[in-house]
Amino acid sequence: MGTHAKLRTASVPLLRHACGLCSLQDWCWPPGLDESDRKQLHAIVRHTCPLPAGHHLFRADDPFTAIYAVRSGCIKTYTTDRQGYEYVRDFHLPGELLGFDAAYPERHHFNALIIRTASLCIIPYRDIAVLSRQVPGLQTRVLALMSRDFARQQMCVAGSDATQQTAIFLLDLEARLRRRGYVESEFDLPMSHENIANYLRFSPETLSRVISKLQQAGVIHVHRRHIRLLDVARLALIAEGAQLEQKSALD
């Protein structure tokens, strides 16, 4: 895979800074740890130098060896069918984890491709398993992170039509980016429109039409990959199933 050659041990001060907005802080810094437990946690974490777009972290059927936490950039996970057609499964943003899916049967089910230059923390899974039996509460925290990510993925593809699915996607993306310090209701898409359409399981042309409709209705403003949510309340109603054309019910 080429990732492990670029690893180095992360120092405690660097980890405190790098994980300040990371979901790993939920278990890297559990309350009540004594100094020896903290040192054990820090000792197993490695981090990468920046890795370029186009680099695979792992591919489907690779052995499961580690969990990855995104520190910067964006990674997509995807599968391919027998004809080589790609199906985007998810996008992973700074502060989020990936790789949990392979815990059983200890092989990855998906491919993980960097789509925007990324740096990562890498945590060997067997080391986590050992520490989970030694550090109180660590196993519960890891399981909670796994469940949360699965629930979010299910929600994002729950829409009944393209407009509702797009609204759900934009609101979810805005919330995830805002938690990591981005300006509220305004952000740059870290992935292409083609990737978004693939993830939502409709064509790029359909996504373009939906975005144009939302923009014409004054719900969002789009310039290339930059998006501003002009009417979050109205977008939330659309995400709940309200029709865009029924303006009297939305205003």
Image (tube, rainbow, N blue to C red):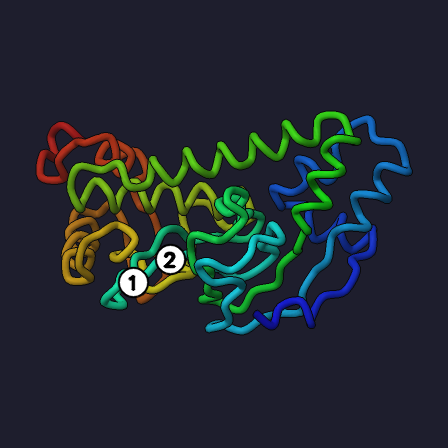
Are circles 2 and 1 on residues that touch, CB within 8 Å? Answer: yes
| Label 2: which secondary element | strand
Q: Where's residue 56, x and y in %?
A: 50, 67
Percent position of residue 246, x then y: 9, 34
Check disc 1 and report the residue beneath it: 86
* Residue drawn at the location 15% of the way across and 56% of the way down: 206
* Image x and y of residue 223, in percent: 31, 64
Q: Is residue 20 above or below residue 51?
A: above
Residue occupying the far left of the picture: 245
Give coordinates of residue 175: x percent, y percent.
44, 41
> Which residue in the structure is indicated by mark 2?
78
Q: Quadrant of residue 139?
A: top right
Say whether disc 2 or disc 1 marks the residue closer to the N-terminus.
2
- Which is nearer the eye, 224 or 92? 92
At x 68%, y 51%, the residue is: 124
The N terminus - image quarter: bottom right
Give the amino acid at mark 1: Glu
Element marked by disc 1 = strand
Left or right, residue 37 beside residue 67: right
Image side of residue 105 versus residue 81, left or right: right
Q: Residue sitting at 74 percent across and 38 percent down?
A: 130
Q: Dot 1, crowdedness within 10 Å: few (<14), some or many (≥20)?
A: some
Compared across the picture, whether 210 is left or right of 139 comes to left
